[in-house]
Amino acid sequence: MRDESAWHSEFFFPAISPEFAAACLELRRSMYQADRPGGRGAWYNAIIRMRRDGLIAPLYDFSQPPFGHWGPREVDLVRRDQELYPRDPGQLPAWHPAREHP
């Protein structure tokens, strides 16, 4: 089986260390909600803040697009993400390229 961490690191985390990218990917994998009723899949965006007092305040976004600009490469990445972390079609956001549009 192919090591997905290198693939993800190259496209999603180009400006951070490989160790930090691997930790983010493991967090995303561990939070993936596939088999729960109403499972939202994996988050698309995350903001993790550390306050001065040491408290960590994460915000996970399961519905907004992960990219500000969309081209063929981004569409392919989001489709691949759906293969790695599948969501029920009813849980896909309206913008998602794997969603069936009438």
Image: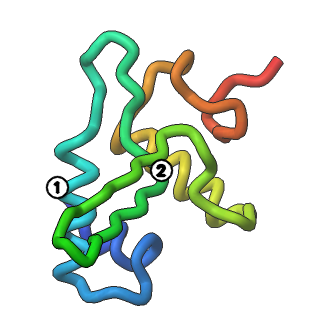
Query: Can you give x and y, in whole percent of width and height, for residue 61 in the image?
Result: 48, 46
Query: Residue 58: horizontal and vertical position, in percent?
Result: 33, 55
Q: Residue at x 63, y 62 (%)?
A: 67
Image check: 98 left or right of 72? left
**Residue drawn at point x = 41 percent, y = 40 percent:** 83
Q: Quadrant of the N terminus?
A: bottom left
* Corner quadrant of residue 95: top right
Distance CA(mark 1)–CA(mark 2): 24 Å
**Disc assigned to residue 69:** none
Which is in the foreground here, disc 1 or disc 2? Answer: 2
Looking at the picture, how far across and down is residue 92, in whole percent?
A: 56, 28
**Considering the image in quadrants, where does the C terminus appear?**
top right
Q: Residue furthest top?
A: 37
Q: Label 2 amino acid? A: Tyr
**Colouring of the image:** rainbow
Between 60 and 30, the residue placed more toward the observer is: 60
Residue with the mark numbered 2:
44
At label 1, the amino acid type is Met
Callout 2: SS: loop
Q: Position of residue 87 (x, y in %)?
A: 43, 27
Check disc 2: other Cα within 10 Å, few if <14, some if 14-19, many if 20+: some
The residue depicted at 20 percent of the width and 63 percent of the height is 55
Quarter where residue 74 is shown? bottom right
Judge whether residue 11 can be spotted in this image.
yes
| Whether residue 3 is situated above or below residue 62 in the rendered picture | below
Q: Which residue is mark 1?
A: 1
